[in-house]
Amino acid sequence: MYISAEGIIFRQVKAAGGRRMILLFTKKYGKISAGSSISEKGKKRSALALRPFTYGVYELYKNKEYYNIDSADVKRSFFRIGEDVDKYMQASYILELTEKTLPEDLPQPRLFNLLTEFLSAMEKREKRHETLVLAYEVKLLDIFGSFPSLDSCARCGETENLEFFSVQDGGMLCRACGNKANDALIYQPKFDIVNILKFFLKTPMGAFEKIALDEKAAEELQQILRKYISYHLDIGTLKSESIFEGEF
């Protein structure tokens, strides 16, 4: 059976006989693994469509659970991401994060659209790229139903004096619960984490082309979100997480 799918390549691995195994995030079919004999070398559109940060259209042959990419064409290339080291590393982290959160063969059109919006905004942004990463992480948590509880204490339900953030409890803690807790994954942010998370959630990704969060707040929020995502989405440590060490 032959199928056509729009998609973004997560990664590829060389295989025997000049073939490649490609992990592809498609809008219609979700994350799929596919083989291909298309060479990634040269300037043909089929070669360009197999490179990172390219939104392509792929013609695949499906035989039971096996896919093969017979041809590929570029729908949109976010090539400028690769021209900036910081952009490239930040976007690589997002690709790895997205890959690890997705089960295979399960369509996630909202997340696919979010990823394309992120790549578009990242390509256009000039500096302080970490704000885009934070916005994507917040919206990803919402898509997977893991957005933290912000309006009441995750332990006692209190709605006042919400001063602590608990990774394990999945949201804010009131002053009383936070002071009694003995947990390394409880934070007392030095910024207004509730309103910032709500702002990231409701603001379209495209708006973050020019919005930049305060550097100290961004650093602290990234530390919290990395722990939160690892805990609630069960993805472990990502290889690309090291890019944030000393980033801010």
Image (spheres, helix red, strand yellow):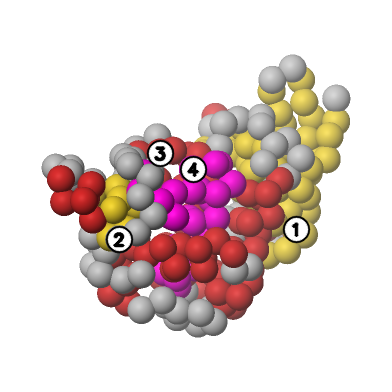
Residue in the picture at 76% in, 40% down: 28
Query: Residue 74: which disc?
Result: 1
From this viewpoint, which residue is outermost toward the top? Answer: 64
Q: Nearer the viewer, mark 3 or mark 1?
A: 3
- Measured from the top left, where is residue 4 in percent x and y? 83, 40
**Which residue is denoted by mark 3 in the rendering?**
232
Q: Nearer the viewer, mark 2 or mark 1?
A: 2
Q: Nearer the viewer, mark 2 or mark 4?
A: 2
Q: Nearer the viewer, residue 166 or 6?
A: 166
Q: Nearer the viewer, residue 2 or 100?
A: 100
| Tally of numbered tags | 4
The amino acid type found where label 2 is placed reads: Asn
The amino acid type found where label 1 is placed reads: Val
Residue 81: name its quadrant. bottom right
Q: CA distance from mark 2 to mark 1?
A: 52 Å
- Measured from the top left, where is residue 150 in percent x and y? 43, 54
Query: Residue 161: which disc?
Result: 2
Q: CA distance from mark 4 to mark 1?
A: 33 Å
Query: Residue 221: which disc?
Result: none
* Mark with earlier residue (2, 4): 4
